[in-house]
Amino acid sequence: YFIRQRPNHTSRNTSITNPRISRAQLELQLAGSTRLMVRSIGRCPMLINGVQTKEGTLELGDVLELQNQLALVCIHRPRRIALQENHLPHEFGKPDHNGLVGESPAIWALREQCLRVSRRSNHVLLHGPSGSGKELLARALHGPNKGPLISRNAATLPEGLIDAELFGNLKNYPNPGMTEREGLIGQANGGVLFLDEIGELPEHAQTRLLRVLDEGEYQRLGESQSRTSHFRLIGATNRPPQQLKNDVLARFKQQINLPGLNERIEDIPLLIPFLFNKMSQEDPTLPSRFCDTHRGTLIPRTTPAFMRALVRRRWETNIRELEKLLWRSVDSSQGSYLELTDEMTSKPQPASPNDSVSAEAIRSSLRKHNGVQEKVWRELGLGSRHVLARLIKKYGISIK
């Protein structure tokens, strides 16, 4: 049962004291490893994905709403969560020591992978959708006291000056009047060079990176002698990694896939207070208009319908898009709650090319990975575990 707690000074958790929610409100029952049977037994109307009903089956990613009172997202948490070594666990929902926000299985898997890769010195390729936090992860991989962190967006390197920007050049070379450059690779000696949008580098520029990635040797333009830079390259791209030149891609011994919001929708309610606290630094009037304060954190007041729209949305630019929608809501909301905007509800859900994955391919992968769905959706190239759950339901595949 989902039972409203009575206020109790000995309880560590905040009680749900709203009188509109019945003491015994919901009856929940497991229906397999990834489904929940739910039945409303209280007086507060229940909605599943916005449709009012008395009972139903919850799939991964579904939104359960107690009308105008509470919104819940159906997720599957891992049984075992590894913590970063040498760091105390961060408070639930708050940024960890690297600034990552989220408690979803996807973000915890990313934390574990980041911990493993940060111990090594291999070059790393980060790939993920726009706005998924690649620069933040690059800073996490760099860590403290590991030499300089030199960051540059590869798409901003002028076509005719790419070599000079990367490797440096002597004064007045190759053109009169040019200033002397140390070059990004020289600046990163003893540390990390982060090249965002590395996939935007022309092929000839990618080719010139091969020797310095292997041996650390390079030459400034106009110099005859070789130099050496001991650095780690962290490249980032929102393109498929295979679009990089094969021999360049082979130099990245470590690859990390960053999940977008579509793969961790359960983190959206945690990201909203985090973003709103940042927004309040730009506009100090926001807390008094829209926020309550809990343990020193500003918690924006939102309706369940507002939250439902965000967790059911198909995201493209992820955190940037979420922050933009919050600003739009701030500008259009008249009361003390953040309200829905047309932009939140008018975006159609695009047809997914993943629907072409056959039932037999899913069954074969499930057998191969002993039913571990996290490995299955990644192997099949699906957008998220929620896409896999939808296809399993579509094909009527039994999960044992």
Image (cartoon, rainbow, N blue to C red):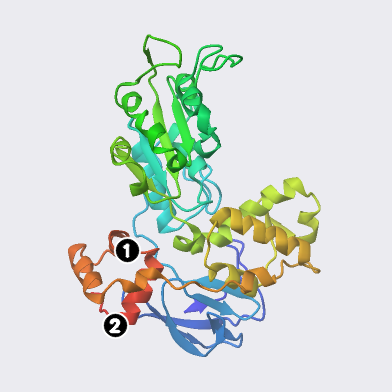
As helix, strand or loop, the secondary structure at mark 1 comes to: helix
Query: Residue, x 45% and y 32% (percent of image)?
Result: 142
User: Alpha-carbon neighbours of circle 2 within 10 Å: few (<14), some, or many (≥20)?
Assistant: few
Quarter of the picture holding the C terminus = bottom left
Q: Amino acid at mark 1?
A: Trp
Residue 351, percent across and down?
Answer: 45, 73
**Label disc, if present, on residue 396 of the rendered structure:** 2
Query: What label sits on residue 377 in the rendered view?
Result: 1
Residue 283 is left or right of residue 172, and the answer is: right
Residue 399 pos. (x, y %): 26, 75
Q: Report whether 131 appears left or right of 274.
A: left
Is 345 left or right of 41, judged from the image as shown? right
Decide: few, some or many residues near mark 1? Use Cα within 10 Å; few <14, some 14-19, many ≥20: many
- Sequence-wise first label, 1 or 2: 1
Name the kind of residue labelled 2 in the image: Gly
User: Residue 114: image x %, image y %?
Assistant: 39, 42
- Foreground residue, 334 or 245? 245
* Residue at screen point 63% across, 69% down: 344
Tell me the quarter of the picture where residue 342 sits. bottom right
Dot 2: element: loop
